[in-house]
Amino acid sequence: MKVRHRVKSIFLWVFLTFVALAFSLPGNTASFLTDLELNLEKQIGQNSYESIIAQMTVVELPEAETERLNNIFNRLVQVCSRRKELKFSLTVVEDDSVNAFALPAGYIFVHTGLLTYVQSDGELAGVLAHEIAHVDRKHGMNAIKRQLGLGLLLQIFLKDAGDQVARIGNLAINLTQLGYGREAEYEADRYGVYFMERAGYPRTEILNFWHRLVGESGGGENPAILQLFSTQPPTAERIKRIKEIPTPTQ
Ligand SMILES: [Zn+2]
């Protein structure tokens, strides 16, 4: 038992040294690791996606409504830098709260409560763009790496330990629900505005959405409305920053 433990420690040490070395080297090794990390992201994403659809009720919208939603979504994905390496998907789930969330590797979810709350395609585009930006900027994966360390993550992946990946999938869901922190939210707002404007929706749409939410949540007592806020930076500060983001050059 002891010997096994020792062998394991040595393996881990060698592995971590390899990872550290690989990151300091340009070229093939680094790109090998990038591929490895991307595969890991896809596996974690798929795993957490499957858990979510097992827990929540997936909603099939009428055909015209699905088409409208997919059009908005695809326009946004087209302008996102990771569109070629990932397969982005949009899933509608039954929940009255005004919310949307993103899992690693491009699995975006919207609540039915958000769909009934938005007043235009542009407002919906603004929220979706923010979620796509979380994936584009790898906020989910970065949060997982911060929690576990890349060395451990890659080790699990290389050992092909399915149950461990499932546990990381659950961690991904928890982190999504907790939010990725203030700076990540500001960054997703910034890139979200960039994506929505590149896709042809003015930022006034997402500003209208935020203003209306703030107005309606009043003192902040309505939990259905506040879901989207609970883990976010102060809304007034977000609105101020969104207004200041420079317009992207086409
Ligand atoms: Zn966010």
Image (cartoon, rainbow, N blue to C red):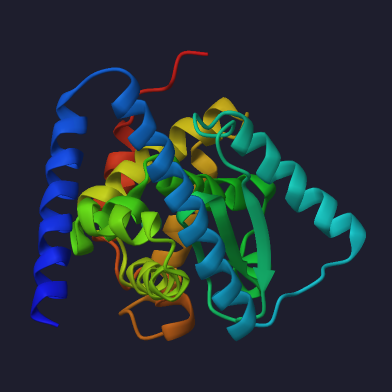
Counting every numbered tag in the picture gives 0
**In the rendering, at what x and y percent does residue 193 appear?**
45, 37
Seen from the viewer's position, the closer of residues 157 and 124 is 157
Residue 88 in sight from this viewpoint: yes
Against 199, residue 178 (above or below) is: below
Residue 131 in sight from this viewpoint: no
192 horizontally vs 115: left or right: left
Q: Quadrant of residue 75?
A: top right
Q: Residue at x 46, y 55 (%)?
A: 104
Which residue is farthest right?
Answer: 63
**In the rendering, at what x and y percent does residue 38 appear?**
44, 43
Viewport quadrant of the N terminus? bottom left
Which residue is farthest top?
Answer: 250
Q: Quadrant of ligand 1?
A: bottom left
184 horizontally vs 165: left or right: left
Seen from the viewer's position, the closer of residues 105 and 133 is 105
**In the rendering, at what x and y percent does residue 37 appear?**
38, 44
Q: Residue at x 23, y 59 (%)?
A: 152
Seen from the viewer's position, the closer of residues 215 and 200 is 200
Q: Quadrant of residue 136?
A: top left
Q: Quadrant of residue 76?
A: top right
Q: Residue at x 37, y 41 (%)?
A: 137
Against 243, residue 128 (above or below) is: below
Against 184, residue 25 (above or below) is: above
